[in-house]
Image (cartoon, rainbow, N blue to C red):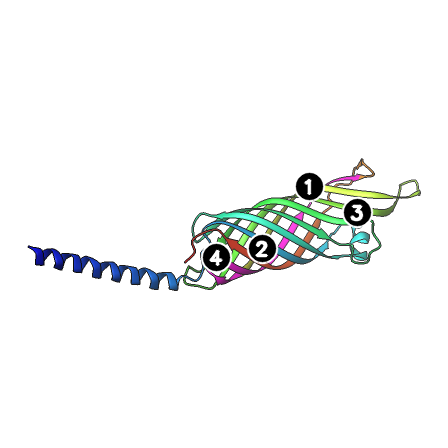
Amino acid sequence: MKKSIINFLSVCAAAAVVLTATNEVRAQDIQSDVSGFHVNLNLHYGQWNTSSQFLEGIRDYDPNGIGVQLAGGYGFNQRLEAFLHFSYYDFNMSGDWDTYTHIETGIGFRYNFGATLSKIRPFLDAQINLSSFEMDRIFFQHAGGQMVEGKLEMEGLTMAVGGGARYFFRPWLAGTLHVRYHYGSNYDMFFEGLEMNLPDQDVSQIDVGIGAAWFFGKRF
């Protein structure tokens, strides 16, 4: 009886050792994990465009800008995640403006390719954003011929689609490369606080960003 108990305990101990070793090997195989909560910080370089005759003079003077995006999200699994973001762009590259900014806040969804055994995880995403431009000072001519100057503000909803890839240095830490295209065509426009009746003022923007993402999940 005693010998049987000893044999049984020996078998259990051996099984525990094998199971632990197997889990360690599996953990070592894990290269990336996009599930759970994460934060992402990106630096962007972008350019905007328009088909509006009213806006094209502003665009042609300073079309390029730099920006930063802070995002936080949740991965439901290894494929789908949702995120909130705040983006700020400064287009005052010439230094001739008092203010020349573009701010976006929005929600997005991302689809990830690859699996946990991959260090490189490509993705596609889509966003809907509340977008606001502020341009101070601008000059334009009234219908009566008078030239005026002041601050122009634009607000509206925009859509953005994008894609890129993450490279995981650790399963919870990744560098990111992200390309996005934004488009909006129904802005409310205000000059010195007074609403302007200028329909179909469209804005498109494309930007490229690099950054880092931190995942608050497992530590393999």
Marks 4 and 3 sit apart, C-alpha to C-alpha, by 40 Å
Q: Position of residue 160 (x, y in %)?
A: 61, 50
List the single residue furthest toward the left. 1
Q: Residue at x 60, y 47 (%)?
A: 85
Q: Which residue position is annotated with label 4?
A: 172
- The numbered mark at residue 162 is 2
Image quadrant holding the N terminus, namely: bottom left
Q: Which residues are magenta?
A: 166-190
Taking 138 as reference, is 46 above or below it? below
Q: Which tag is nearer the camera, tag 2 or tag 4? A: 4
Q: Which tag is nearer the camera, tag 3 or tag 2? A: 3
Marks 2 and 1 sit apart, C-alpha to C-alpha, by 20 Å
Q: Is residue 135 visible?
A: yes
Q: Which residue position is annotated with label 3?
A: 135
Counting other residues with Cα less than 10 Å from the Cα at mark 1, is it few (<14), some (14-19), or many (20 or more)?
Answer: some
Taking 35 as reference, is 31 above or below it? below
Disc 1 is placed on an element classified as strand
Q: Residue at x 74, y 51 (%)?
A: 51
